């Protein structure tokens, strides 16, 4: 059957901000689907609150709504757009849950919207743990022993039947949020109540523990003819008990015989049929007993997922794209296999290489959080590597991670082994060390339950220390690990071969240029024989590697735009990246994709084969910049802003001198090369100070010191992180005078060496001191006068020209006392805010930048003159505090957010309110405010309290804050601090008697009480605001929401409204 | 750790040396010797399945062939009795990227040790992808796996002495000398002309309660009829179906008298018996992921495949473009091509209408491979009962 013609307009829901458990993979899937559906001639309406996604680029949908993914807003979009169908399987758990609520609330019925891809009943059978169990059992499939409970009391009654340890799993949450393992009765009641809280339907499943069993995933697809197939099997090296998202995984599975594998395959097909996913893909997870081979079904996700993205990248089979086609009526056999073009998609890929995925964590940023791995996902990103053998792929994946620091290895072997008893994020480093120290495979298998096959592979890698170079390269060692230089290795005749990812193990010719490198032990033929390098010049774009806090999807966004632009300008775009989640590693994005680690060695090999016109390093964040100088040294031509300028901007001393020469203000600073100097600088500058090691991104290890003793403590702490890169590279230490109560600004600009275009000036909501990545910001700026704006533009322009910027430039300013402008930082490269500005203004910054890099002039770009438009855009950061138990929900100069959302409206309070809603912060419209602030914030707090009182809120406060408020004649109730005994504020919050918390931390010391309050609020999902500026904006937003549900407008409408009248090319530069 | 690590060393030379692959067109690839330290020649083919190496090498259809495994890691889960498709290894040699000798607790032996003890040579460390690309372009061809110290001339001579696969009768080498009887069960009695039947087929028939007699493939039609069977099964097997005219003759004499069902070589024999022709594919179909469409139901099965020859459609067509069953006239009346391979649209199945007979080119018994087509055994038993 060809595509359905009874559907004309389709609604797609995205997955919202990047959070732990739901990341860029849904942008990849969404983009694929949108492209296909537009190609098929459908109108596509998209809702997604995440501006940093490619899918929210206006060209990927007919109407793009960057709006909160809430029931109300999506209902408003449906009412306005009247789509015929909703495809809810592309936006992760968020979209699936929303699709379910839209059905439950009768919205779909009311507007006649058909749910396609997966039916409502199938969603329920897959997602409701109880129904899922029943469905499995009635189809003769095994599930773990379990019980569903809705209260603690119910839970206590079944504990004996299941036995401890057991797994607590809340219904309808993603990434296992709110779940965990209970070993003891005490842990049992704690986990159960957490789980009940986390579940939107207050339901948890208590389940027999299968910890230590093998964990396998199968990616399955099915069409309306009931043809079903397995795209890929994935084996988790970390056995059951570690969330698949946190596990190191390998594709295809390695340890099961064909007989055992076919059992999984049969069951996987039985599961998708039983649940009734009729058109699309599903991820099905199994546990397999290492002793008996018994197979148990763990769960199924009736939608595209992180694993389906991985499976697509691992095999070349584009699951999301095909799922979208299936949803609109095609059968698998009617869809051609992209890669071979000649064979249909109704087949199972077979591969002749091995793929390893390793997650990347961010525990270093959350000192109070336990780095142990459990059933709840904690990683923030991942890398994938492809090699001909498992060992090659594993070694490539290890080096793709770009870790900032290596874990410290305990001297004592017993201690080392102790660290292996519980899975933790750094377990592989410990495992390798244990092998080095001669610990047996058996012993390690006992401690980790990792399948002996994998352990033997690791043992072999460790044992290869003394082997010859050829063997080491065959095993996947880098030159550095093998102890040679590139020149020595090449002199030995060793170079990798490039192979294509072709879905068919070379049985057919591959048309799609998607490659990986590998060392062949006995290479045969030309190493680039498979590379389809035409005659067009090529330009290499270096991607941004694994997502991590501080370097996320925004950079991938820029890289994708660069690829599109390079192609448009008549060259072949060549992408190098190792992140399987992203759009950049979709083979459709570039002319050639090399799935490779972003190291000098690996990139130079690609360049050797490509012989590109040049390499673009300014879009991939810090990752390409780390290797830029070495590439240049090796004779590679870098395009755009010279790398020297990028370095100059990072070099405090030289850059300070430059600013002084240009007469541009900056905070007083000093540089210290040892502790003594640090103290000296501190005394000279005066406190408070902002201190950090040089060369860090995302404000890593950056802290505020209010006194000399705090400064000394800071230095001590860094040193104690011994052995790590951080400790080694802590000097020179950069010390800045901290600008208090300053307004922070982010400016993004374009330059071609002669002209400069200031594309966006964003005013932060939180004052300077909260990392720009974590603070909300608004465009156009709210409270700056024309004169100040002109001065900002002027300074930006001067800096861009002085640094010889060709491409993008980001400048962070602070405005002190509303009049003095200070430069905090200059980044002559793509910044985190590029996608936000592009969406807010309609000017595709990264694309224009890429044109400039390739030699076009700014004046030919016809950019609109910057002006206060018809709308206000707010960006808000999304923080992982809820996911990372024990983390302190406080903002500071070290970045902690994982993602961002955007709110757009006619006025600031409404836009801010939308951004909050999009970020999952439900600002109450009535109820109770609890406020407790440090002394300096008391005057502002009383104002806020007054306003909230006027809005009808009951106001609670701790003693000091209450006194200040009462003094202004505002009714306030006084509460005990947690330290002062029950009933205290914590009790109130936990009981649900507080609807919003405003708490500003008082300097350093008084952490604990505040920490308790903030954790209580986070756990209860009560909005918790930790800055006065943030609180002020929130209160204004609360006021605004009272005037009803805000209206929705698509980006296409907004950009049309904002486009300059007439056709005259607008002057590029202003100021 | 060292003990078990050494035990599990990947493709460390068991025989201690290098080895090479030489093809009849002069192509030479290097590797390391594993398994038995001897030379072997045969038709060099490739198999794209990711699991099931033991089943593959013990499948009699690989007789006189050397298997190149496209999946790079072979030997991961050792070998066990349960995975034997016949009593011994039939492949002449194996070519691998990385052969390994892991021996999990439930395995009977390590793969490389087993190859050695069975006297079968292997070669590891080979750039198998380059080899496969070569075979894909030039077609399957003769070649061999040779110990590193053997001279090129000697190797070339060995290859030259090996007969070509075209026109080669190999069934004689794998067929039993005496009938083998499995007579427990109360179901229909099936005589299989054993051209190298796989154990999985036997198992599947027995699971459906069939009583089974595996007859030497040189048996006459009368020999078969003397068994008073309810049906005849035509097995898989090695070699060129065109060289088996004596068996084809037997089949011709049986069609119409008894229900007949064939798999793989058996499919080719039945097709020849009813008047269709066969041809040699460039590099064959060997793997576990080939989509086959049942033209009457529209259902697609992911199938296990292992054949170097295929059946020509009516009029000699190699590719069948229709999406419905293709009607044709045979020596036994009306028939239809029932299944087609969606990769290259070659014939995958035939059903006769006027007499009870059907066959498929692929392997519904899997072993190794997906189980999508097991229903065909049920259909066969139903046909016998009808
Ligand atoms: N019964 C169990 N025993 C041990 N570990 C389990 C059990 N059930 C699930 N897990 C572990 O928890 C992880 C998350 O569970 P899963 O059902 O997949 O939830 P999610 O929806 O978060 O993916 C799994 O990947 C697995 O490692
Ligand atoms: N001198 C200063 N006074 C006040 N705040 C500062 C100062 N320097 C930096 N900050 C704050 O710290 C954050 C991170 O500093 P920045 O230099 O931008 O580091 P990064 O390279 O991590 O972006 C800024 O966004 C700003 O809020
Ligand atoms: Mg899961
Ligand atoms: Mg910054």
Image (spheres, coloured by chain):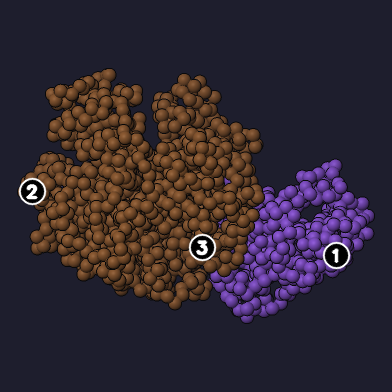
> Are marks 3 and 2 in one subunit?
yes
Q: Nearer the viewer, mark 1 or mark 3?
A: 1
Report the Cα–Cα distance between label 2 and label 1. Answer: 100 Å
Query: Ligand 3 near label 3 (Cβ, under 8 Å)?
Result: no
Q: Which residue is mark 1?
A: B330
Across and down, in percent, residue A309 comes to: 48, 52
- Pick the residue in front: A915 or A825: A915
The residue tagged 2 is A685
Point out residue A118 in the picture as x, y percentages from the top left corner.
55, 44
Contact (Cβ within 8 Å) of mark 2 with mark 1:
no
The chain that appears purple in the image is B
Q: Which chain is brown?
A: A
Which element carries disc 2, helix, strand or loop?
helix
Q: From the Cβ of disc 2, is ligand 2 less than 8 Å away?
A: no
Q: CA distance from mark 3 to mark 2?
A: 57 Å
Chain letter, disc 1 residue: B
Ranked by sequence position, the earlier of labels 3 and 2 is: 3
How many residues crowd mark 2 within 10 Å: few (<14), some (14–19), many (20+)?
Answer: some
Q: Which mark is residue B381?
A: none
Vertical arrangement, residue A163 with respect to residue A325, above or below = above
Pinpoint the chain carrying mark 3: A
Q: Classify residue A477 as left or right of residue A641.
A: right
What residue lies at 19% left-to-right and 66% top-to-bottom?
A801
- Which numbered marker is on residue A501? 3
- Left or right: A1020 in relation to B173: left
Taking the spot 20% from the left edge, 32% from the top edge, the residue there is A944
Secondary element at tag 1: strand
Quarter of the image with the C terminus of chain A is bottom left
Of the pair A109 and A432, the residue shown nearer to us? A109
Q: Is residue A924 among what the camera can see?
A: yes
| Residue A526, placed above or below residue A53 | below
């Amino acid at each position: 059957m060809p595509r359905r013609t009874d559907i004309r307009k389709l609604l797609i829901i995205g997955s919202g901000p990047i959070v732990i458990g739901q990341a860029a993979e849904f942008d990849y899937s969404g983009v694929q689907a949108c492209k296909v559906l537009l190609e098929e001639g459908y109108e596509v309406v998209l809702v997604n609150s995440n501006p940093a996604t490619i899918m929210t680029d206006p060209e990927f949908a007919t109407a793009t709504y960057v709006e909160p993914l809430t029931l109300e807003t999506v209902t408003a979009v449906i009412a306005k757009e009247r789509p015929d169908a909703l495809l809810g399987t592309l936006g992760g758990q968020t979209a699936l849950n929303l699709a379910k609520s839209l059905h439950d609330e009768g919205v779909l019925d009311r507007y006649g919207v058909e749910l396609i891809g997966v039916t409502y009943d199938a969603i329920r059978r897959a997602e409701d743990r109880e129904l899922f169990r029943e469905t499995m059992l009635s189809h003769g499939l095994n599930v773990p022993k379990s019980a569903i409970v809705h209260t603690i009391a119910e839970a206590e009654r079944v504990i004996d039947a299941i036995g401890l340890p057991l797994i607590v799993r809340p219904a309808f949450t993603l990434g296992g949020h709110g779940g965990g393992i209970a070993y003891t009765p005490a842990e049992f009641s704690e986990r159960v109540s957490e789980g009940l809280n986390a579940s939107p339907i207050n339901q948890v499943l208590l389940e027999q523990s299968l910890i230590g069993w093998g964990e396998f995933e199968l990616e399955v697809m099915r069409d309306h003819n009931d043809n079903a197939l397995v795209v890929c099997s994935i084996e988790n090296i970390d056995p059951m008990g570690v969330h698949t998202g946190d596990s190191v995984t390998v594709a295809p599975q390695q340890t099961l015989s064909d007989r055992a594998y076919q059992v999984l395959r049969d069951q996987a097909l039985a599961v998708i049929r039983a649940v009734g996913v009729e058109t699309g893909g599903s991820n099905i997870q199994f546990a397999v007993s290492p002793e008996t081979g018994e197979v148990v079904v763990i769960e199924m996700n009736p939608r595209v997922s992180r694993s389906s993205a991985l499976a697509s990248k691992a095999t070349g089979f584009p699951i999301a794209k095909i799922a979208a086609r299936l949803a609109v009526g095609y059968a698998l056999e009617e869809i051609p296999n992209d890669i071979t073009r000649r064979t249909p998609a109704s087949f199972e890929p077979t591969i002749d290489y091995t793929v390893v995925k390793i997650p990347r964590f961010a525990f270093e940023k959350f000192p109070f959080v336990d780095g142990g791995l459990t059933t709840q996902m904690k990683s923030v990103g991942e890398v994938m590597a492809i090699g001909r053998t498992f060992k090659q792929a594993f070694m490539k994946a290890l080096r793709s991670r770009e870790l900032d620091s290596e874990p410290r290895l305990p001297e004592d072997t017993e201690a080392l082994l102790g660290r292996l008893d519980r899975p933790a994020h750094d377990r592989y480093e410990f495992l390798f060390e244990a092998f080095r120290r001669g610990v047996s495979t058996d012993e390690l298998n006992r401690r980790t339950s990792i399948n002996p096959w994998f352990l033997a592979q690791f043992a072999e890698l460790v044992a290869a220390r003394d082997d010859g170079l050829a063997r080491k390269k065959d095993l996947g060692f880098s030159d550095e690990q093998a102890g040679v230089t590139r020149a020595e290795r090449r002199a030995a005749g060793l170079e990798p071969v490039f192979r294509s990812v072709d879905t068919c193990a070379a049985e057919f010719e591959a048309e799609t240029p998607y490659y990986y490198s590998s060392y062949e032990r006995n290479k045969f033929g030309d190493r680039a024989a498979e590379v389809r390098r035409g005659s067009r010049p090529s330009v290499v774009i270096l991607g941004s590697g694994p997502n991590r806090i501080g370097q996320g999807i925004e950079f991938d966004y820029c890289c994708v735009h660069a690829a599109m632009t390079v192609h448009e300008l008549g060259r072949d775009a060549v992408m190098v990246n190792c992140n399987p989640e992203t759009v950049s590693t979709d083979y459709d994005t570039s002319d050639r994709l090399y799935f490779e680690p972003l190291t000098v060695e690996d990139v130079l090999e690609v360049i050797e084969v490509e012989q590109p016109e040049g390499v673009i390093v300014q879009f991939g964040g810090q990752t390409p910049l780390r290797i830029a100088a070495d590439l240049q040294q090796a004779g590679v031509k870098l395009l755009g802003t010279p790398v020297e300028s990028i370095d100059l901007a990072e070099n405090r001393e030289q850059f300070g001198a430059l600013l002084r020469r240009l007469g541009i203000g900056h905070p007083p600073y000093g540089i210290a090369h040892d502790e003594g100097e640090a103290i000296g600088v501190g005394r000279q500058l005066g406190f408070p100070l902002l201190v950090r090691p040089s060369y860090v991104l995302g404000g890593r290890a950056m802290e505020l010191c209010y006194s000399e003793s705090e400064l000394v403590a800071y230095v001590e702490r860094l040193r104690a992180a011994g052995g790590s890169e951080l400790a080694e590279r802590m000097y020179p230490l950069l010390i800045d005078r901290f600008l208090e109560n300053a307004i922070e600004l982010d400016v993004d600009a374009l330059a071609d060496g002669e002209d400069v275009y200031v594309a966006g000036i964003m005013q932060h909501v939180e004052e300077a001191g909260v990392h720009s990545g974590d603070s909300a910001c608004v465009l156009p700026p709210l409270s700056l006068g024309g004169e100040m704006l002109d001065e900002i533009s002027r300074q930006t322009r001067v800096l861009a020209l002085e640094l010889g910027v060709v491409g993008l430039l980001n400048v962070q300013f602070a405005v002190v006392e509303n009049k003095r402008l200070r430069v905090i930082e200059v980044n002559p490269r793509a910044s985190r805010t590029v996608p936000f500005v592009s969406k807010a203004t309609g000017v595709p910054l990264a694309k224009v930048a890429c044109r400039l890099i390739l030699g076009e002039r700014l004046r030919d770009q016809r950019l609109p003159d910057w002006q206060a438009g018809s709308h206000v855009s707010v960006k808000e950061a999304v923080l992982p505090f809820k996911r990372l138990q024990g983390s302190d929900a406080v903002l500071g100069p070290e970045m902690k957010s994982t993602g961002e959302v955007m709110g757009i409206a006619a006025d600031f309070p409404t836009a801010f309110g939308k951004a909050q809603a999009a970020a999952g912060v439900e600002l109450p419209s009535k109820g109770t405010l609890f406020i407790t602030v440090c002394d300096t914030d008391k005057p502002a707090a009383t104002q806020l309290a007054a306003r909230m009182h006027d809005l009808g809120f009951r106001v609670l406060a701790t003693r000091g804050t209450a006194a200040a408020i009462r003094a202004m004649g505002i009714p306030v109730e006084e509460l005990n601090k947690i330290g002062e005994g029950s009933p205290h504020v914590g009790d109130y919050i936990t009981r649900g008697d507080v609807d919003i918390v405003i708490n500003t931390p008082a300097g350093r010391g008084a952490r604990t009480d505040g920490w308790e309050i903030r954790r209580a609020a986070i756990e209860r999902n009560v909005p918790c605001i930790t800055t006065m500026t943030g609180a002020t904006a929130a209160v204004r937003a609360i006021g605004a929401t009272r005037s009803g549900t805000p209206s929705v407008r698509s980006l296409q409408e907004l950009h049309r409204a904002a486009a300059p009248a007439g056709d005259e090319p607008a002057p590029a530069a202003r100021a | 750790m060292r003990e078990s690590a050494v035990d599990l060393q990947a493709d460390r030379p068991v025989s201690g040396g290098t080895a090479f692959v030489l093809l009849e067109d002069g192509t030479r690839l290097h590797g390391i010797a594993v398994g038995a330290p001897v030379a072997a020649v045969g038709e060099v083919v490739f198999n794209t399945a990711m699991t099931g190496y033991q089943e593959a090498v013990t499948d009699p259809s690989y007789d006189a062939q050397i298997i190149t495994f496209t999946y790079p890691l072979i030997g991961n889960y050792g070998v066990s009795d349960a995975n034997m498709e016949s009593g011994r290894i039939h492949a002449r040699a194996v070519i691998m990227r990385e052969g390994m000798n892991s021996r999990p607790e439930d395995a009977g032996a390590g793969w490389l040790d087993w190859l050695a003890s069975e006297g079968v040579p292997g070669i590891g460390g080979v750039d198998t992808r380059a080899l496969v690309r070569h075979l894909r372009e030039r077609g399957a061809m003769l070649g061999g796996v040779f110990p590193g110290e053997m001279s090129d001339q000697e190797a070339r001579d060995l290859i030259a002495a090996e007969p070509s696969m075209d026109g080669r009768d190999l069934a004689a080498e794998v067929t039993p000398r005496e009938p083998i009887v499995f007579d427990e069960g109360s179901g229909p009695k099936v005589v299989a002309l054993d051209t190298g039947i796989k154990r999985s087929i036997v198992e599947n028939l027995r699971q459906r309660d069939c009583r089974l007699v595996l007859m030497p493939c040189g048996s006459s039609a009368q020999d078969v009829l003397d068994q008073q069977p309810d049906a005849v099964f035509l097995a898989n097997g090695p070699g060129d179906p065109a060289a088996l005219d004596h068996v084809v003759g037997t089949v011709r004499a049986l069609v119409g008298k008894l229900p007949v069902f064939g798999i793989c070589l058996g499919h080719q024999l039945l097709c020849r018996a009813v008047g269709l022709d066969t041809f040699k594919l460039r590099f064959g179909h060997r793997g576990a992921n080939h989509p086959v469409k049942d033209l009457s139901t529209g259902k697609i099965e992911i199938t296990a495949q292992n054949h170097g020859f295929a059946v020509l459609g009516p009029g000699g067509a190699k590719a069948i473009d229709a999406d419905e069953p293709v009607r044709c006239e045979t020596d036994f009346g009306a028939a239809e091509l029932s299944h087609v391979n969606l990769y290259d649209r070659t014939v995958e199945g035939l059903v006769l209408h006027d007499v009870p007979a059907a066959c498929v080119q692929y392997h519904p018994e899997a072993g190794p491979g997906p189980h999508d087509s097991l229903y065909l055994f049920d259909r066969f038993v139903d046909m016998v009962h009808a």
